[in-house]
Image: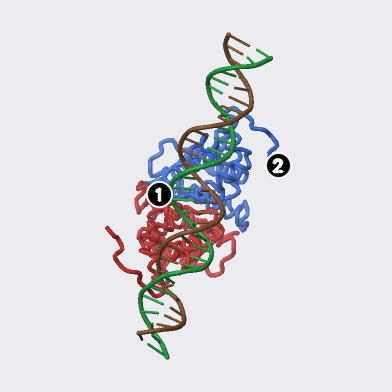
Chain colours: A red, B blue, C green, D brown
Amino acid sequence: MSIDVGQRRRFSPDARREQILSVAVRLFGERGYAEVSTTDVAREAGVARGLINHYFGTKKDLYLEVIHVMLTVPPVALASLPDGDLPVRIDAIVGWFLDVVSRHSQSWLAAITAGGMAGDAEVDRAISSAIDAAADAVLTAVGFTAVTPPMHAMARSYVGLATSTAREWLERDVLTRAQVHRLLSLTLLTMVTSVFTDD
Amino acid sequence: MSIDVGQRRRFSPDARREQILSVAVRLFGERGYAEVSTTDVAREAGVARGLINHYFGTKKDLYLEVIHVMLTVPPVALASLPDGDLPVRIDAIVGWFLDVVSRHSQSWLAAITAGGMAGDAEVDRAISSAIDAAADAVLTAVGFTAVTPPMHAMARSYVGLATSTAREWLERDVLTRAQVHRLLSLTLLTMVTSVFTDD
DNA sequence: CGAGCTTGTTGACAGGCCGCCAACAAGCCG
DNA sequence: CGGCTTGTTGGCGGCCTGTCAACAAGCTCG
């Protein structure tokens, strides 16, 4: 019952990196950080454990690349948002966010809360930059050009509301998409019209 | 250079538990879950490492009790909220929340995001019940009696907004308390008057 | 006041995971 | 075909965790 019948094969470094990384993304996505050992990744990749350290360094470094992949969302069609009225633009950005988060729910939503390793400096920085990207997307979609630091911080807060609401929708199944859409649209409208104005 | 000059002393089980638990709360509050070993807790408590397992079982069980302590907030003066108009009650509950979270910021805010161990089933359940408690506090303070599941879920979402906003305020120092208060009050008012109404 | 007993406490053992590194060999090149 | 570059392996040392038999602190009873 030999699993790996194959001899020892040489791959291109890029190919090996990609292969190991894809296995790591899958495993870290299914279970958490602590529940996945480098031995697991090596076994499922059909590779010696030491090779992971050779390519990625530390297990935490591997995890950093994994969450980078999981948090990197194709900003496709983000520029193709309608130029209509403010409520129209808000509906568009909210719908776009719900589409994205429902597609890679198991990836993005799990990584944004650092499934298993919040508190680490580098992991927190990676998550923070992902929040920044989402906040920037919201601000540009709403139509803001000159963004002050407080406005940016409030947009980051709104991303926190969006993620927690999406979690209620996708992982708890008690809210409908329409309710989530309505909540996020109205709160964003309130923040834009009443909160951002005078800072 | 002997640190512990004391002989082996016998304590009451409750006293030992409390002593070890206080040390664990401090260490897990300062650093994350993975960064603190049971050897650290045992050393700082002046106790053999095996005693921790004897009293708490697994390291994760100890961590569960730790976050239970950190997330248990004295609901003092929560019943003594003013009975005034809706904006008045909202201002009161928001101010109360900001007071609480600014006092145990290093505890509550760090534990609500499961500093180092999200994804675990039991840890997630503990955090979820803490969110439930906060959501119930918000709902009762606002004045709702009959709470439907969707409303409860929306209140949980609002708690997510509150925590992320408090994090922007306390850990990033770019928002003032007044701005945070205004944001949380206006969004809660919006949710109560426009979102909750028709579900 | 001393012997015995309850039980809080300890230290060591076994298993697992991680980072590191010298040795090995697959595939190219002259 | 022989040598060489370098992708790849397996084992070593160290740290961490859960378990458990042995030890002793302090109470109890004769």
Question: Where C17 falls versus D4 (above or below)?
Answer: above
Residue sitting nearer the eye, A115 or A18? A18
What chain is tagged by disc 1?
A
Image x and y of residue B6, in percent: 69, 34
Residue B22 image-quadrant placement: top right
At label 1, counting other C-alpha atoms closer than 10 Å, the crowd grade (few under 14, some 14-19, many 20 or more) is many
Mark pair 2, 1: CA separation? 53 Å
Percent across and percent down for residue B38 are 55, 44
Query: Circle 2 sits on which residue?
Result: B2
Regarding residue A131, the answer to whether it shows in the image is: no
> At which x and y percent is residue B164?
53, 53
Q: How far from the left and from the top, in percent, is residue B131?
A: 48, 43
- Which residue sits at x=56%, y=58%? A121
Question: Farthest residue toward the left?
Answer: A1
Chain letter behind tag 2 = B
Q: Amino acid at mark 1?
A: Glu
| Mark linked to residue A168 | 1
Residue B93: image quadrant is top right
